[in-house]
Image (cartoon, rainbow, N blue to C red):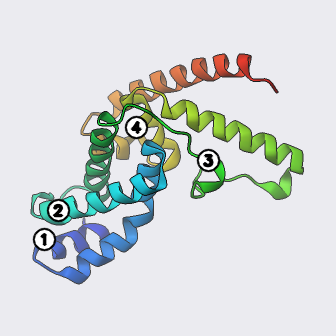
């Protein structure tokens, strides 16, 4: 059974511009957040998100309506960002205050004292800066899981791999992140 997204994609495949515009509206923020986490600069993320939707528009006829539209879209977005990163020889920090609130950025400040909120913010900055410096395959799976809040099956669909492969990659990515954060915290002046 097709969801609303797949029905819109099917309509867009027939040339329905309004259906495509609705898909852009629905997925603009998630694609931007993904690009921002992967690329680290707002302007680059905006350019990448726009490029993703241009590619989707040009390739909409290749979409398999029996599959999830979001997985197909995120795969294009991930590949676009990885291509841009390969052309870059540097990485940048994503400031916490610029990040859109997602499952991992949201700090419940009403439950924390100002000092605790600041410490949480510093920790989030450290985590995402560490993620930014991870290899592409680990960074991608961490962002899909913890920024876009995709399930392991949705990640598998997005990356075109089996669910058990996602579980292994996610385990390795978490382990790598833990080790990198452990080293970072040992050097942390706080």
Which residue is the site of mark 4?
140
Question: In the displayed structure, does residue 150 sit left or right of residue 19?
Answer: right
Q: Residue at x 39, y 57 (%)?
A: 31
Q: Position of residue 56 (x, y in %)?
A: 21, 61
Q: Nearer the viewer, mark 3 or mark 4?
A: 3
Q: Between tags 1 and 4, which lies in front?
A: 4
Q: Earlier in the sequence, mark 2 or mark 3?
A: 2
Q: Tell me how far mark 3 sits from mark 4, CA to CA.
A: 19 Å
State the image coordinates of residue 133 (x, y, percent, origin top left): 49, 29
Q: Residue at image x 43%, y 44%?
A: 39
Q: Position of residue 116 (x, y in %)?
A: 85, 43
Q: Mark 2, residues whose alpha carbon is within 10 Å: few (<14), some, or many (≥20)? A: some
Disc 2/disc 3 C-alpha distance (Å): 38 Å
Residue in the image at 46% along x and 50% along y: 36
Q: Earlier in the sequence, mark 1 or mark 2?
A: 1
Callouts 3 and 1 close, C-beta under 8 Å: no
Which residue is label 2 attached to?
65
What residue would you read off at disc 1?
A: 13
Report how far apart the C-alphas of labels 2 and 4 lie in the structure. 25 Å
């Amino acid at each position: 059974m097709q969801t609303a997204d797949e029905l819109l994609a099917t309509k867009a495949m027939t040339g329905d511009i309004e259906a495509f515009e609705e898909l852009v509206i629905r997925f603009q923020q998630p694609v931007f957040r993904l690009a921002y986490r992967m690329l680290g600069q707002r302007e680059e993320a905006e350019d990448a998100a726009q490029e993703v939707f241009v590619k989707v528009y040009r390739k909409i006829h290749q979409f398999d309506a029996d599959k999830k539209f979001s997985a197909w879209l995120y795969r294009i977005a991930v590949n676009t960002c990885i291509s841009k990163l390969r052309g870059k020889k540097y990485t940048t920090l994503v400031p916490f205050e610029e990040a859109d609130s997602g499952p991992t950025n949201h700090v419940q400040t009403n439950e924390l004292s100002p000092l605790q909120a600041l410490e949480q913010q510093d920790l989030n900055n450290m985590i995402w800066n560490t993620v930014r410096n991870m290899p592409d395959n680990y960074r991608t799976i961490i962002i899909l899981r913890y920024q876009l809040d995709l399930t392991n099956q949705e990640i598998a669909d997005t990356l075109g791999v089996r669910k058990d492969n996602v579980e292994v990659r996610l385990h390795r990515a978490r382990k790598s992140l833990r080790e990198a954060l452990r080293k970072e915290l040992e050097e942390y002046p706080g």
